[in-house]
Amino acid sequence: MRRDNYIIFSEGKIGRIMLPNRLVRSATWDPSILTRRVMTDEVLNLYRGLALGGIGLIITGGFPVFSERSRNSDSGNWLSTYADLRIKGIERLVQEVQRAKPKCRIIAQLENGNLNARPSVVDSPFSRRKVRRLTMKEIGNIVDCFVEAIIDMDKAGFDGVQLHAAHGGLLSRFLSPYTNRRDDSYGGSPPNRARIIREIVSKARQTVNDFPILIKMNCTDYLVGGIDIDTFSELAQEIEQTGVDAIEVSGGMWDCLVRSEQELSFRPVPAPESHTRIRNPEKQSYFLKYVEKLDLGIPVILVGGNRNIERLEEIVSQGKVNFIALSRPLISEPDLPNRWLEGRGSRTTECISCNSCIFAMHVHPVSLNLVWSRVCIKQTSPSIV
Ligand SMILES: Cc1cc2nc3c(=O)[nH]c(=O)nc-3n(C[C@H](O)[C@H](O)[C@H](O)COP(=O)(O)O)c2cc1C
């Protein structure tokens, strides 16, 4: 049975852009272009496949907008700026998606690159490197790199950008009270922890006006003293005040992986935003309970373990969630949105959430896009049926 009358397959709006349906491809890293800094045919094919598969909005893998220069650099500047890191031919990605499916929208995710500095020096079990605390001047440089990237993505034709402020990256370390222990204007209260986001958005808006700026943030860090269900709503309201156009709700920081399965209520495998063992429907859409507490005037995108179209329709019809985002299921089935719309096959995804894609990303970072389909273990893979 076709599902044309489902809310999920109705149009939705984020800022000034109209999306043909409520299904979003959540950011999924594209290592091959990042290592070579040039757009490749493999990546163009991947995005064409997603657009043709019926997704309403594609969020690209995170593009680093700055990273620390090596100590031996003779330039004297501590940061590689966005201009140093820009991917040659990035505008081809937009053109490819527009050509394949003119109504499909594409947004660039922006994140930090390698950096030996943090808002505060907090020991992490997963980093042996000694990190230092960012100075106010350096925070200003970082804001400028994000702003430069936002302006460039607008010029390249993207429909918007998403600030990656989840999963323990630099921006999420500012937002979390666990990782941000500063006692200056960037730390402490929710408005102070959100200050860097406010500065990026307001400075960028001076040039790009209403160009959509989204954010992905944690609703829980799964850490005692971090963002959690009791504090998330207030922080999300603060983030709304920064002028972003939508919030994608995710969770987890690698730092939490030393905790037990009992404490976390999921198996602590990398990465904590991508839970495994979620075949049981009660384990799916695992950030929903955090979103149910929100009362925001901007769209909310729910990511994390969304696997069953009937359940997802129910979630969207309850009104707290406006868009549903998927990452691993679209690695497994890029045409999943069309399959669900046309009523072909199962109401659940073929993806079994085994995280073989994540392991592959860490083991073969250079050529990953060439092997996506080979690393993916599906519901229908001969080895598991
Ligand atoms: C291979 C892979 C790469 C990912 N890369 C990113 C990324 O670049 N930026 C990001 O915010 N999240 C990234 N994620 C996390 C996903 O966007 C998503 O939040 C998470 O996998 C949970 O959603 P899912 O259950 O639909 O996979 C990645 C996930 C996978 C599986």
Image: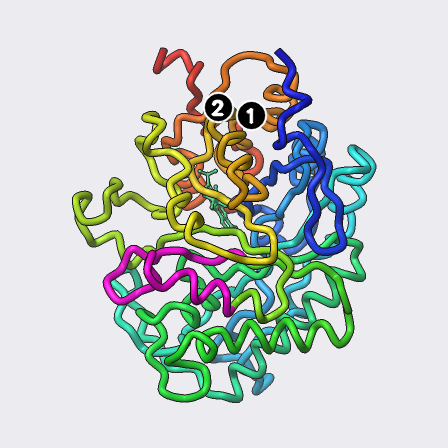
Residue 349: image tag: 2
The residue sitting at 57% across, 34% down in the picture is 370
176 or 151: nearer the viewer? 176
**Residue 169 horizontal/vertical position (percent):** 44, 62
Q: Quick one: quadrant of the N terminus? A: top right
The residue sitting at 57% across, 37% down in the picture is 369
Q: Seen in the image, is 338 located left or right of residue 26?
A: right
* Residue matched to label 1: 333
172 or 382: nearer the viewer? 172
Span shown in magenta: 216-238
- Asked if labels 2 and 1 touch by Cβ distance under 8 angstroms, the answer is yes
Q: Seen in the image, is 14 located left or right of residue 224?
A: right
Residue 54 is covered by the magenta coloring: no
Colour theme:
rainbow
Q: Is residue 124 above or below residue 101?
A: below
**Residue 178 horizontal/vertical position (percent):** 31, 69
